[in-house]
Image (cartoon, rainbow, N blue to C red):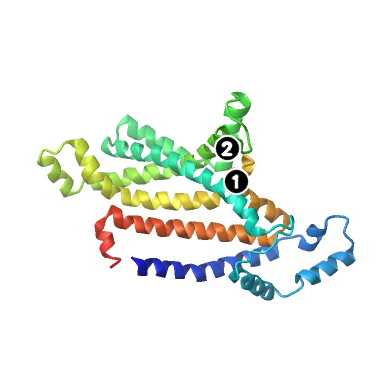
């Protein structure tokens, strides 16, 4: 297991190098001049040219990339062009907010989707199953920004139950968390249902029933554990996606997370801040996937044997 984890961690290095270069290249193609944005609208052409030379903006892209990577190796993620503050410090302040929102959303998804998926599978083609799958299909189809706006109109502007944006107590967390949770709930529900349907048709399930084991015990003790493996995969992927993909939701709800920070940084062409956010997103997604792989060993002992 330790060798497997070490191998997976080492594989992150070339992935991160490639991701950072790709983002670096894409940002260089975006319109706008970073020196002009740093100095503001009142800056003279001479000052802009001087700053470009001082900060190395005139150097070839590969040189700028190499300089950034050398600083990153030493633990320096750079300084924000727009605020002049440390990128690591800014992200350190915002990341807990994004993590809180993501964890709340994925917990809501799991608590809702797993029971619905199990019940739908055990009562296939029932009214509950049909209605649940229709709702799941609708949930997958709705874009998060549209869902967020609808929730704001309904529960904030019309009913006044929750604030429309910002981060101020538990109430301000509910609407953005539900916005993120809706699509994830739909995906996890469909996966759980499909996996349960496959498992409950296996011979060992029929054997347990033939021995007189109650239906509830068969589902809990024999079927659910095996059916959870694909569901855990989807939950892990959804968590990683939510952690890095809460950009639109954070923007709609003015939630002070790193997703919103990245959008603001892209608009300002704040390259160090954008790269810092991308690094955090990529590392978070990779770490979540590694944790999910390790969890497999505890859910299914057969998988643990493959790590030895």
Residue lying at 27% horizontally and 35% vertically, measured from the top left: 123
Q: Position of residue 202 (x, y in %)?
A: 19, 48
Q: Position of residue 2 (x, y in %)?
A: 36, 67
Residue lying at 32% horizontally and 52% vertically, measured from the top left: 229
Q: Residue 258, can we see it?
A: no
In this rendering, position of residue 187 left or right of residue 126? right
Hey, which quadrant is residue 254 in on the image? top right
Disc ID at residue 297 = none
Circle 2 is placed at which residue position? 148
In this rendering, position of residue 108 left or right of residue 277? left
In this rendering, position of residue 230 left or right of residue 163? left
In this rendering, position of residue 148 left or right of residue 59? left
Hey, which quadrant is residue 168 in on the image? top right
Relative vertical location of residue 190 with respect to residue 174 in this rendering, above or below: below
Circle 1 is placed at which residue position? 248
- The Cα atoms of the two marked residues, 2 and 1, are separated by 9 Å
Q: Earlier in the sequence, mark 2 or mark 1?
A: 2
The quadrant of the picture occupied by the C terminus is bottom left
Q: Callout 2 environment at 10 Å: few (<14), some (14 to 19), or many (20+)?
A: many
Q: Secondary structure at mark 1?
A: helix
Q: Callout 1 environment at 10 Å: few (<14), some (14 to 19), or many (20+)?
A: some
Q: Position of residue 50 (x, y in %)?
A: 84, 69
The quadrant of the picture occupied by the N terminus is bottom left
Relative vertical location of residue 164 with respect to residue 53 in this rendering, above or below: above
Q: Secondary structure at mark 2?
A: helix
């Amino acid at each position: 297991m330790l060798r497997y984890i070490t191998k997976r961690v080492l594989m992150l290095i070339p992935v991160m190098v490639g991701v950072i270069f790709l983002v670096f290249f894409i940002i260089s193609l975006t319109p706008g001049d970073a020196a002009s944005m740093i100095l503001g609208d009142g800056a003279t052409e001479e000052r802009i040219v001087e700053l470009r030379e001082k900060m190395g903006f005139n150097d070839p892209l590969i040189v700028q990339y190499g300089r950034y990577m050398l600083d990153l190796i030493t633990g320096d993620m750079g300084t924000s062009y727009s605020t002049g503050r440390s990128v690591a410090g800014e992200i350190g302040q915002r990341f807990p907010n994004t993590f809180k929102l993501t964890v709340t959303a994925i917990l809501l998804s799991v608590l809702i989707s797993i029971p619905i998926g199990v019940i739908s599978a055990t009562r296939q083609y029932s009214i509950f199953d049909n209605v649940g799958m229709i709702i799941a299909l609708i949930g997958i189809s709705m874009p998060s920004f549209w869902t967020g706006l609808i929730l704001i109109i309904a529960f904030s502007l019309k009913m006044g139950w929750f604030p429309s944006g910002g981060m101020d107590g538990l109430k301000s967390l509910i609407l953005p968390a539900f916005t993120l949770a809706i699509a994830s709930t739909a995906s996890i529900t469909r996966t759980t249902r499909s996996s349960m349907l496959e498992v409950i048709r296996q011979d060992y399930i029929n054997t347990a029933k033939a021995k007189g084991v109650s239906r509830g015990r068969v589902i809990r003790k024999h079927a659910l554990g095996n059916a959870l493996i694909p569901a855990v995969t989807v939950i892990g992927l959804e968590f990683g996606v939510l952690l890095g993909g809460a950009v639109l939701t954070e923007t709609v709800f003015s939630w002070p997370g790193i997703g919103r920070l990245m959008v603001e940084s892209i608009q300002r062409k704040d390259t160090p801040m954008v790269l810092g956010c991308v690094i955090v997103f990529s590392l978070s997604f990779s770490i979540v996937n590694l944790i999910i792989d390790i969890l497999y060993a505890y859910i299914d002992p057969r998988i643990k044997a493959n790590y030895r």
